[in-house]
Each structure stands twice: as structure tokens, then as C-alpha cells.
Amino acid sequence: MTGFGVHSEVGRLRKVLVHRPDLALRRLTPSNRGELLFDDVLWVERAQQEHDQFVAELRARDIEVFLLHDLLTEALASPEAREWVIGHTVSPYTVGPAMVDAVREALAGMDPKTLATHLTGGVTRAELMRFADDDRLAARSLAVATTVGSSFILPPLPNHLFTRDTSCWIYEGVSLNPMYWPSRQLETVNLGTVYRFHPMFRQEKINFWFPDAGRDEHDEFDTQSFGRSSIEGGDVMPVGNRTVLIGISERTTPQMVEILAQRLFARGGAERIIAVQLERKRQFMHLDVVFTFMDRDTVTVYPKVIDGTTAYSIRPGDKAGTLDVTAEDSFLGAVAHAIGLSHEKDLRVITTGGDEAQQEREQWDCANNVVALSPGVVVAYSKNVYSNRRYREAGIEVVEIDGFEIGKGRGGGHCMTCPLLRDA
Ligand SMILES: NC(=O)NCCC[C@H](N)C(=O)O
């Protein structure tokens, strides 16, 4: 087996990428948190403790946990990686033409760890003035003249916390995802740096489903040209049998599902995609906030959303490059079939716990967003008491972590993990 690849949603998790809360979360304020996709500001030290508890639970089960900041720092030891990431992050479109050189020079002067901190945590105008070797910037740059010290020259990326979304492994390859909201798009540049330049990935010559350097006219860093195509990993689930579930959501568009489907089918990555259409609402932003796997035949669902969904199976069409799109009678029926069950009723469906109001509260607090460590063992937030009780009654082992602070970004264990190696 190669060092990386994700072959199911519940097989033993062996390697995973996470991101410990850091500088970016210290930058959240009541006025910027909406644009940065958080529902509140965080007590960062407590968020770090909660995250450390999560990582400790993973490591206690012999899962190899990689921290994004470490991998990025290690990748940035290479001058080629530094030049590449700075070139892609700092452009006339991100900082204004007058400031490109000053910001690039400021970043180039940082040691790898500090650079990783600012690539994920952003750079304020005051910080730039400290790093930049030019006190006349305000006279030349409108972007400097019209901002104050705390304004962002490079925006912080607090949603790096949700490593699930920015890149995702589908069987033997990885997709570096074009993200929907501008406030998440630069995350993909950082992940691209890690996958392209970190020795651990470089040695493996990993397989990129997207973008494909040889074929795509643009890459993940040229986000201006993606038009209506975006996809986020919270919508993508390789469930085994060469099938991938993909949510069509606020974040993932049918156009991008078609592009990924063509790529996967042409190169043998998958044979069937089950696309499920979700309501475009923040509380249901990705498939994984209303549906995750807990055991080989067991899923947790938020019924209010999943019950009314429409699903389609996409398979290779009769000519190369074409797709065959067939409407399914039910999403859960299609899932049951895809994982080898004879009937839809053989799929054990555990709904969010409590009455309708409690279900709504717990879905909001990520009760349906659990991550399986092995078949039948999941990590869940302790605050979701009704749902966790229900999961245990169904025979699931629930490992509880606190999510009072980290949960304010609207993500649970599934969102906070990017599996790098998982068994079938
Ligand atoms: N897979 C997920 O559902 N990820 C959660 C992402 C939360 C983040 N604040 C966002 O809005 O993108």
C-alpha cells in the first residue's frame, strides 16, 4: 500500500491532517467574523486545549496526526516552495499592484515558521510596516493609504481549522479544491504548497485529481478563472466500491462535480458518483453537516434535510469523456446499494437525537458531523447529549471531546480532519 489514499469513510484511519487553532483565530472580531464564516469570536487558548484533546484522542488510537503548520513550515524550507507560495499568494489582485514587491519582500525575509504563521494567519498593515523596508508605502499605495494598522493586507484564514474542505483524498489521489467563498480561496495555495513541496508527498509522486498540471488551463491558484465551479471536501465522501458521494450544496456546484467525475472516470479513480442536492443554507453548507458514516452499514442523518433530497448517479457515458446521469429514487437507497447492501432498509440510519427543536439545535452544533476512527468508533462533541445517547444505544462507541470554542466555526470532527490514509 502506498503512503496515502482514502478508501472508505469508516475503515481504520491511519494518517490524518489537522490544523491547530492559531493566529488566524486571534484576528476574528465581531465585525469581520461574518465575512470570515465564523458565528462568534473565540477564546483561542481554550480552542487550542479542545483541539489538543481531539488530537490526543486520535494519537491514543495510533493514528498518525500531521499538523498543517508543521507541514507548511517544513515545506517552506525549500527556496522553490517559498518562491512559489509567495508568487501565488501575493498578486496585484490580492494586495494591489503598488504593494506587490513590498509584501513579497517582507514574506521572503521571514524564516519558514514565521512565514507559515503569516500565510495562515494573515498580515496586517501594521505588521507589514514592521517587516517592509520602505516607509514611503503610504504615498504609493492606495491600499495602504486607505487602511488602518489593524487592516489586513493579506487576510487571515481561520477556516484552515476545517482541513476536510480545502483538499480531499478520493481513493489514490487528492483534489486541491477551488473554494466557494473568497475568504477560503487562499487556503488552497497553502495546501498546494504542502502537497507539491513537502518531502513526504514529493517522494510519493502523489496523484492529483484536480488540478491536473498537464491538462487544466488554470491551476488552483488562479481562482479568478473558476467561474461557477467550486467544490469543498465536506461534500465529498469516498465510500468504497469505487463510489463517491458528493453533495451539491452552497459550496459545491454541479459544474465542478462534472469536471471531477470526468477526471476520476478517465483515470480509473471511481466508477460511480452519487450526487445529492441539498438546500443552499449556511447551516447545511456541506453534506457532512447533515450526513456522516459511523459504521460500515450505519450513518447519522439530520432527517429534516436528508429526507427531502434528490439524488443522481453519475457513471461513465457511452463515449469517452461523456457522463451518464440517472435520477435515483432515494439518496439513502442509492447509498445502501453502493456499499453492497441488498435493501435500503439494511442501512442503519440513526437520526439526530431529541425532539424537533433539540434536533435542530444539535445539528447546528455538528451532531451529525462525526468522524469515524475505525468501524463503529466515532468522535463527537460532548454537548450533543441527545444524539450521542442515541448513537450509543445503536452500539456505536462515541469518543467525546469538548467543542465549545472550536464549534463556533460550525464544524465538528469530520470537518476538522483531512484523512490522508484510511483503509477500505
Ligand atoms: N466540512 C464542513 O462542514 N466544514 C465546516 C466549515 C465551516 C467554516 N466556517 C465554513 O463556513 O466554511
Image (cartoon, rainbow, N blue to C red):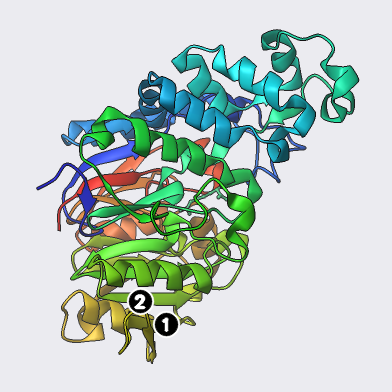
Question: Relative to 276, is 157 above or below?
Answer: above
Q: Position of residue 63 (x, y in %)?
A: 20, 37
Residue at image location 69% in from the left, 22% down from the top? 101
- Rate crowding at label 1 as few (under 14), some (14 to 19) or many (20 or more) other CA atoms within 10 Å: many
Q: Is mark 2 within 8 Å of ligand 1?
A: no
How far separated are the C-alphas under marks 1 and 2?
A: 7 Å
Q: Is residue 157 visible?
A: no
What number is the disc on residue 274?
Answer: 2
230 relative to 415 in the view: left or right:
right
Q: Amino acid at mark 2?
A: Ile
Q: Quadrant of residue 327?
A: bottom left
Question: Relative to 388, is 127 above or below?
Answer: above
Residue at mark 1: 311
Residues marked 1 and 2 touching at CB (< 8 Å): yes
Q: Is mark 1 within 8 Å of ligand 1?
A: no
Question: For the view shown, which residue lies furthest in the left direction?
Answer: 1
Q: Nearer the viewer, residue 58 or 215?
A: 215
